[in-house]
Image: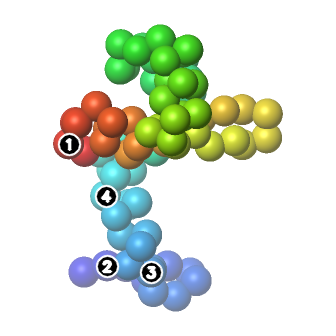
Amino acid sequence: MEEPSRYGTAAPAFAGMAARASRREPITYTVNDAAAVSGLSRATLYRLAADGRLRLVKVGSRTLVDATSLRALLGVAA
């Protein structure tokens, strides 16, 4: 049974986030980390993003690679 949060019942959208967090799967990678785990170069990742095939997220001055987008591109199940 799901424990209520101090803000009320957790929204269904957050249920998936909790499951992912328990498995320690990242939701984003730095560009360097994405290059390391995928075997693609940084330049290739930026080119794929420019082509609309990979989602990048800006957080302040940092550029992060959306992990779901990277897995989909590589054809890897979550």
Q: Tag 4's secondary structure?
A: helix
In contact (CB < 8 Å): disc 4 and disc 1: no
The crowd level at tag 4 (other Cα within 10 Å; few <14, some 14-19, many 20+) is few
Q: Earlier in the sequence, mark 2 or mark 4?
A: 2
Instruction: Indicate the position of residue 38 as horizontal and vertical percent values.
Output: 35, 20
Kindly identify the residue that appears in the image at 34 percent across and 64 percent down. 16
Instruction: Indicate the position of residue 21 as horizontal and vertical percent values.
Output: 39, 50
Q: Name above or below for residue 37 compared with residue 27.
A: above
- CA gap between label 2 and label 1 equals 26 Å
Mark in front: 3 vs 2: 3
Q: Earlier in the sequence, mark 3 or mark 4?
A: 3
In contact (CB < 8 Å): disc 3 and disc 2: no
Kindly identify the residue that appears in the image at 31 percent across and 79 percent down. 2
The crowd level at tag 3 (other Cα within 10 Å; few <14, some 14-19, many 20+) is few
- CA gap between label 2 and label 4 equals 12 Å
Q: Residue furthest front?
A: 51
Q: Which mark is residue 77?
A: 1
Q: Residue furthest right?
A: 61
Which amino acid, by three-letter code, is at mark 4?
Ala
In contact (CB < 8 Å): disc 2 and disc 1: no
Q: Which mark is residue 11?
A: 3
Q: Is residue 69 left or right of residue 65?
A: left
Residue 56 falls in which quadrant of the image?
Answer: top right
